[in-house]
Image (tube, rainbow, N blue to C red):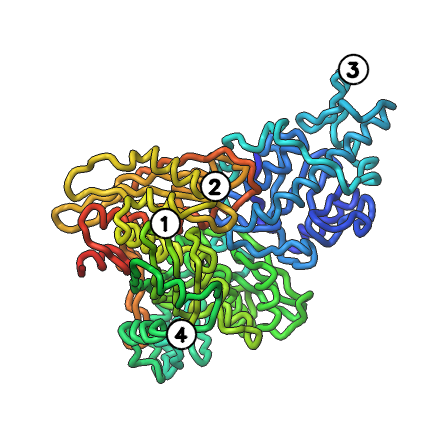
Amino acid sequence: MTTPIATPSRRAFLAGSAVLASALVVPLHRALSSVPAGQLAANGYLAVLPDGAVSLALPKTEMGQGILTALTMLVAEELGLAPSAIKVSIPPADRARFAPIDTTTGGSTSIRELWKPLRQAAANARAALVDAAARQWKVMPDGLTLADGAVVNPASGKRLGFAALVADAAAHVPTDATPTPRSAWKVIGKDTRRLDSADKVRGTAQFGIDVKVPGMKIATLAQSPVFGGKLASHNAAAAKAVPGVADVIALDDCLFVTADSLWTAKKGLEAAAPTWNEGANAGLDQAQVVAALDAAVAKPGVTAKAEGDLAQARAGAAKTVEALYHQPFLAHATMEPGNCTAHVTPQGVQVWTGTQVPSDCRAAAARTAGVAEDKVQVHNFLMGGGFGRRLETDMVERTVSLAAKVPYPVKLVWTREEDIQHDMVRPAYADRISASLDQAGKVTAWEHRIAGSAVMARFLGEKFNGVDDDAVDGAIAPLYPAKARLVTFKQVESAMPTGWWRGVGGLRNTFVIESFADELALAAGQDPLAWRLAQITDPRARAVLQKAAAEAGWGKALPKGEGLGLAVLHIWDTCLAAVAHVKVDAQKQILVPQVTVAVDCGPAINPLGVKAQIEGGVTFALSAALYGGVTLEKGRIAQSNYNDVRPLRMNEAPRVITHVMPTDSAPGGMGEPPAAVIAPAVANALFAATGKRVRQVPLQAGFEAA
């Protein structure tokens, strides 16, 4: 069966390279002229090995989203194989190997980026194998097919296994073979069980935190609880007196303890009793953050989108509606806490981790260790959740800085508390949004002011133009047309370090826009579904909206304290609509027994995987929508574990009913759309059930305060 193969040691990798020297190697994207026949190329590839096996090196990383299965299905379709027959590996980081494909996993891009090049590579391999068989049989290639690792001639019944064809095929690989048309698909579009599920259930799958290296020590760390604080003192002797503790390493802003087990390292850290100079941020709290955001949206920021004459469009309006929305800092709280293993020697740096950015981690390790990048090897593994947290390289940087000071390999593990309280959190935002309506309820003027941390500014540096493109994603081209539109962004930073969080800008903007759409429908005196359908011209968005509403029984009578709410989006090349059924009990607890979803994501490579993504995304984001958020108190994150960064309990998880729409559209992303619609759908249902409009997340706290 297909197993996500843990990245091998350098010795094993080089031994594998020797085997591949006689394989049929097919690059994902580069011209075939750059790949010498029968030789391993230093770029992304799928290969038919000398023994006839098919090998796929994943250009993206599996973190629970199902791309290991979906991408394998694309190859299996072209090569006449069951997906489980293909050997899949997560290769070491090497930006050049897959260029120009970006090895970053995020932004719902994996399928969108690889749909064409991976199918093309597999089609080229198929054509090379068929042509090789045709030459051996001295027949025309037309009519020859692939099945179960062999080329088959239906006319004669002859079969030639891939192993007998590899050498000849490797010398005659085309660049422009035609991928299998949709009408002939046998694998794509069929429900397929996750290829990595069995190993995960059995506990044999290898995640970053599972890494074991000979001679390795385990470490944990304490960082200044106040952002920007420095280490003041610690008792190294007391820590080393704990049996099993190996070393105590102090940096300016953190303290490491290495030991023979994580428990021992934790006990050593407790004994070290670090104290901190808290610094200038010790007085910062959440109220100050919110006040700064509110002040920023009191007037327009830097223009992200401007069209039409806003003043003129407002002047003739029958009604203008304005609202202020707030969204909190959000921790990622991945099931697998922060971890990384590293070994720094005079020969170079070895890193073992699970990351969304393996090539960036390689560069970060090289910078931290002060060596050339070609002296660093990053072995990538499965991730127990990423959600954007593992788009950062700080875990690698911390670990390499420690490994450079000890003579042995060291695995650094963040405790759950350290992981949450030193997260790169999703920024807090304030949105002031207004719209003017004509007599028929049509939008004439639309202004959306956004304020929050600019994650992109950290990455772009001097190239940042004042508008965070991620923060305005989904806001500059909403589904609702207007004669005039102005969207602005104002960068507001605090001491809190910020990063991307599943759904990124499209998630936060969907909450604001789809909640506000219900407010506009109310102002127009129209049903929320009818108002949207009167505004939206996008045919795909209309189709999923109508389907979800119909399947959920929109308009049906519900008992007191219950309501239906909807939300729709067209972002990440996907159209998705959700209808949430909300109940409010006698204790004012918000309950969501069912969510109905309709999705047009282009060809659903694995419909079962699409449904799993929707179920997971809805549940994940519903936790944040109802209970999520971390807050600053005295310059530090007040929350620390799952007791106060609360996920949904199993009995609270909704029944999710998914309808995958037939479509001719190009593939869209599926990692983030389901997470983006749930908060506004629930907020709108809450209003339908109670008459209370909640404009802040988390909704439970906002509802209780309303």
Residue 1: image location, x then y, percent: 57, 34
**Which callout, 4 or 2, points at the residue further toward the start of the chain?**
4
- Residue found 67% across the figure and 53% down from its top: 98
Q: Residue flagged by tag 1: what amino acid is it?
A: Phe
Q: Looking at the rendering, which quadrant does residue 434 occupy?
A: bottom left
Spot occupied by residue 509 in the image (x, y as percentages of width and height): 40, 58
Instruction: Quote the CA–CA distance across marks 3 and 2.
Output: 49 Å
Amino acid tagged 4: Val
Between label 3 and label 2, give the one nearer the viewer: 2
Q: Which residue lies furthest to the top in this view?
A: 156
Sequence-first tag of 3 and 1: 3
Among the 4 quarters of the image, the one containing residue 447: bottom left
- Note whether residue 624 is visible: no
State which quarter of the image contains the C terminus. Answer: bottom left
Secondary-structure class at tag 1 = helix
Q: Which of 564 and 526 is in front in this view?
A: 526
Report the residue marked by disc 4: 492
Q: How far apart are marks 3 and 4 (CA)?
A: 72 Å
- Who comes first in sequence, dot 2 or dot 1? 2
- Would residue 443 appear left or right of 113 to someone viewing this image? left
Q: Which amino acid does label 3 sit on?
A: Ser
Badge 1 crowding class, 10 Å Cα cut-off, few under 14, some 14 to 19, many 20 or more, is: some
**On the image, numbered disc 1 is attached to which residue?**
620
